[in-house]
Amino acid sequence: MTEPGVYRHPTALVETTAIGDGTRIWAFAHVMDGARVGRRCNIGDQCFVEAGAVIGDDVTVKNGVSVWAHVRVEDGVFLGPNVALTNDRRPRSRAPWTPVPTVIATGATIGANATIVCGCDIGAYAMIGAGAVVTKPVPPHALVVGNPGRVVGYVCACGERLLTRGATAQCRACPRRYRRHAGRWQEAGAAVEASR
């Protein structure tokens, strides 16, 4: 049965009712009972969302992505085609399962075919390039490419690369400005609001 306000393709297997209004689930996707999916999400063809996975609001999960238990995807995240998420650092067929949680923070983008090793949290608005292999946590706004993934710059909340000058940065495309605080970039207005 289709929940009110949720589109589910006839070939999708949707076992959970914890799905927010406006979410679309496409062909041959499988969302297990015990998974939670927020509002206005787009779950592409042949995706799998395991029991215990949590997906926030306004998330795009492109075709061929599996979101495993102990993975939390916060609001506004983009997971490109065939992103590989993991949840066990030392998997063996017959060994005890030792899950390691991973958080993909608000607004982050993970490019097609990137691999995220479990426990490597992705900071807010970070951008992971296509095919990158992330083997350590990624700070907010970081631009990560390569194998192993390395930080090669920083990006704005809008996705454009930041022009950095010492402890300040400015977006090339929008009026946002940033300050470096405790080793991390924060939007200048957001830092002021947080300090009040």
Image: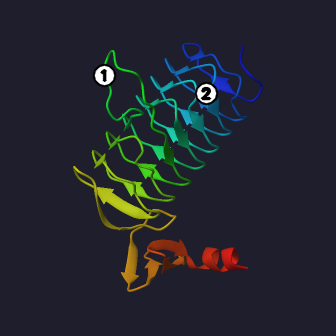
Tag 1 residue: 92
What residue appears at the point 61 percent right and 38 percent down from the top-left corner?
41
Residue 20 in the image: above or below residue 1: below
Q: Residue furthest front?
A: 96
What residue appears at the point 67 percent right and 74 percent down from the top-left corner?
194
- Colour option used: rainbow
List x then y, in percent, for residue 79: 45, 42
List x then y, in percent, for residue 104: 50, 48
> Is residue 25 something that shows in the picture?
yes
Using residue 137 as the reference point, say whether residue 186 is left or right of it.
right
Using residue 71 as the reference point, say whether residue 89 is left or right of it.
left
* Dot 1 or dot 2, earlier in sequence: 2
Q: How many marks?
A: 2
Q: Amino acid at mark 1?
A: Arg
> Is residue 173 something that shows in the picture?
no
Q: Residue furthest left?
A: 147
Q: Amino acid at mark 2?
A: Ala
Residue 46 in the image: above or below residue 151: above
Q: Secondary structure at mark 2?
A: loop
Tag 2 residue: 35
Q: Residue furthest right?
A: 4
